[in-house]
Each structure stands twice: as C-alpha cells, then as structure tokens.
C-alpha cells in the first residue's frame, strides 16, 4: 500500500511516499480502507521535531490522527462492525496511508449523509472544539468568548460550537481577508492581530471589562496576552501550541488577584457518547465542517507547507484514490 512516512525530522520534504505491507488487524482491531485524512498541526510538529511522537513510537513514522473510510476486515473479537461500514477514526493511529489497522474502540460509524472528506476532520477539529468550548470551558448562552486564530481548522470549529450555544464571539486572525471570511462563518467581531494589539482591542470592545473566556491554540506570548484579556473569574482554555512555543511564564499573583482559571482541552477528553453526539451534530448540519483545501495523499508535503504558511481557512484534508 502507499503511505507517507518520515525517517528524520525536518522540512516538509522529509515526508516520503513509500510502499508498505497492508497491516493485518489483531483480534481487537479493524482494517480500514482509507478515503480521506484530516491534517493537523500536531503532525506538522512531529515532522519538525517540536512535538513528541506518540508513546512507544519511533522513526520511521507514518503520521496521522484521524481519517475516514470503510471497514475492510476485522479481528475475531470485534462484533460491532461489518465489512463495508462507513467509519471515521479518532486517535493516533498512523492514518497517512491507504489502509490502517486500529483498535475498534477508536472507530465510529458515520451516517450516509456525511461524506468522507467532512468526516475525516471531525476528530481533530470538532472533538477539540467541543472539549474546549463545552466540556472544559462551559461557555454559556449570551457570554462573550475570545477565540484566537479563529480561521484555523480548530478555531473555526470553536466558532461554530460557540454560535451553536448562543455566545458572542470575538475572533483574531492575521489578515483582513481571513477575518472577513471568519465573520461570514459566524464571528461577531474580528481583530487583525498583525495590525493592532489584540489586548487593547478586546478592552476597547468590552469597555475595559475583558471577556469571561479565551480559547487559545497558539501558545507562547499569545497565551500570556490572552490572560490579560480576561475579566475577573475568567477562564483560559488552551488546546494547542501552533506557535511552536511550548512554555509560558505566568506571574502567579496574576491568577489569584482576579480569580482566573487556566485549563487544558485535549481532543481525547470526550467520552465515546459525547463524540458520537458531535458526529451527529455535524451530520445534521447543526455544526458545519469547514474544509479549506484537499490534496491527494501523495502531496502531503504540500498540505504541510500550506498549514505552516498560515494560509488555512478551515480544515486541510488528504484524499486517497
């Protein structure tokens, strides 16, 4: 089978198209014929060497957190799936390939109304967004939330979830074009952080009060400046470090003087039933899966370049013929 792997860390060019044996599923696994693969910043980070590989994994490595496709085969202890079932995968399982064998607990059936391209990005974008906005952040109807990098795949998913709840959304992006697009997707007020200090803009928009909740997937200085945007008793929800800066030094009194809460939101934090609810909301149109661009599997390096160039507006997907 065709697969994309890297044997050393570096630029997108280290991603190699290779021919590997089709994996045989164990007794607890299913073999999936892959149709589409969601591309995530964590995979870019692993390729660059700035983000750790999954536990127990070494190079050469076939990246990938999520995909969609059909069940081709299954192990003797798997009874909830049959050949031909349309499914998506949620979890680090080496999905940049034509076939992947994964534990059946990581596999979810998808309805016929949901196409493979949209389904391939739900795990990375919407499970993270639901965890950040609903389960961890507990955003309420009528509240205001600041969503950093709101035009990214997870960012625009957070926007969709926040609007589904009935919240007011302030979003940041690097260009006016991205902001105009994000506003068309539901953002109420946009801030171009390349042209103005988003801290000052948030204070201006909120008449100096700040916002009760910030969602950050950038990290570094953006995280620290986001803390300054919070109103008393505010919540900071962190889901990623797209900047590549994995550390941030917080002055501790800053947290307790205004009773701030900082929390993480990982995509794996949703239960199976919660994630199934998210799938159904996307399938019935309550939440929109926003796919920016697709590339064939063989052009995975181009997809990574696109993500790194910060051109993305929504989700990037690889397709398999």
Image (cartoon, rainbow, N blue to C red):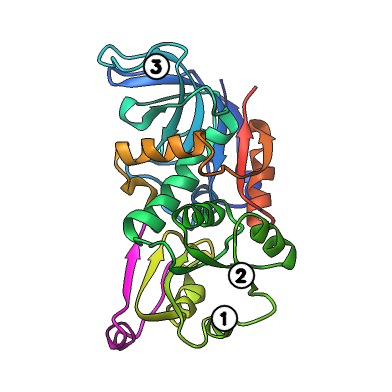
Q: Residue at x 68, y 36 (%)?
A: 295
Q: Which residue is mark 3?
A: 24
Sequence-wise, the earlier of marks 3 and 1 is 3
Q: Is residue 104 left or right of residue 195?
A: left
Q: Give the residue number, with chain letter if any, for mark 1.
A: 205
Q: Nearer the viewer, residue 181 or 256?
A: 181
How many residues crowd around disc 1 within 10 Å: few (fewer than 14), some, or many (20 or more)? few
Q: Is residue 3 visible?
A: no
**What x and y, as percent, mark residue 310?**
66, 59
Mark 2, residue position? 189
Q: Quadrant of residue 14?
A: top right
Helix, strand or loop for disc 1: helix
Residue 133 among those drawn in magenta: no
Q: Nearer the viewer, mark 3 or mark 1?
A: 1
Disc 2 crowd rating (10 Å Cα; few below 14, some 14-19, many 20+) is some
Q: Residue at x 71, y 62 (%)?
A: 180
Q: Is residue 139 left or right of residue 34?
A: left
Could you tell me if residue 101 is visible in this image? yes
Residue range corresponding to the magenta coloring: 246-265
Q: Residue at x 63, y 52 (%)?
A: 307
SS category of the residue bearing label 2:
strand
Q: Residue furthest left?
A: 77
Asked whether 230 or 117 is in front, the reply is 230
Measured Cα–Cα span from mark 2 to mark 1: 9 Å
Query: Percent position (x, y) of residue 171?
Result: 57, 67
Residue 203 on image: x %, y %: 53, 84
Does 173 sit above or below residue 104? below
């Amino acid at each position: 089978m065709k697969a994309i792997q890297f044997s050393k860390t570096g630029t997108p060019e280290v991603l190699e198209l290779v021919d590997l044996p089709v994996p045989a599923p164990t007794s607890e696994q299913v073999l999936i014929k892959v149709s589409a693969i969601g591309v995530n910043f964590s995979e870019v980070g692993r390729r660059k060497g700035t983000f750790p590989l999954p536990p127990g994994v070494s190079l050469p490595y076939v990246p990938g957190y999520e995909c969609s496709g059909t069940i081709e085969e299954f192990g003797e202890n798997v009874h909830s799936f049959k050949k031909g079932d349309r499914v998506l995968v949620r979890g680090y399982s080496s999905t940049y390939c034509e076939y992947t064998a994964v534990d059946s607990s990581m596999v979810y059936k998808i309805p016929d109304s949901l196409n493979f391209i949209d389904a391939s990005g739900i795990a990375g974008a919407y499970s993270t967004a639901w965890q950040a906005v609903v389960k961890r952040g507990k955003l309420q109807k009528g509240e205001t939330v600041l969503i950093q990098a709101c035009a990214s795949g997870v960012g625009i998913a957070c926007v969709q979830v926040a609007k589904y709840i009935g919240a007011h959304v302030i979003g940041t992006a690097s260009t006016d074009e991205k902001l105009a697009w994000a506003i068309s997707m539901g953002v109420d007020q946009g801030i171009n952080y390349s042209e103005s200090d988003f801290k000052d803009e948030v204070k201006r928009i909120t008449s100096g009060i700040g916002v009760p909740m910030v969602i950050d997937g950038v990290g570094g200085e953006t995280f620290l400046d986001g803390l300054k945007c919070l109103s008393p008793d505010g919540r900071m929800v962190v889901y990623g470090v797209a900047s590549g800066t994995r550390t941030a030094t917080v002055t501790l009194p800053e947290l307790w003087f205004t009773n701030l809460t900082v929390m993480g939101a990982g995509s794996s934090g949703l239960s199976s039933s919660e994630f199934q609810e998210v799938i159904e909301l996307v399938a019935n149109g309550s939440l929109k899966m926003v796919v920016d661009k697709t590339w064939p599997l063989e052009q995975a390096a181009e997809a990574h370049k696109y993500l790194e160039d910060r051109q993305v507006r929504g989700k990037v997907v690889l397709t398999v013929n």
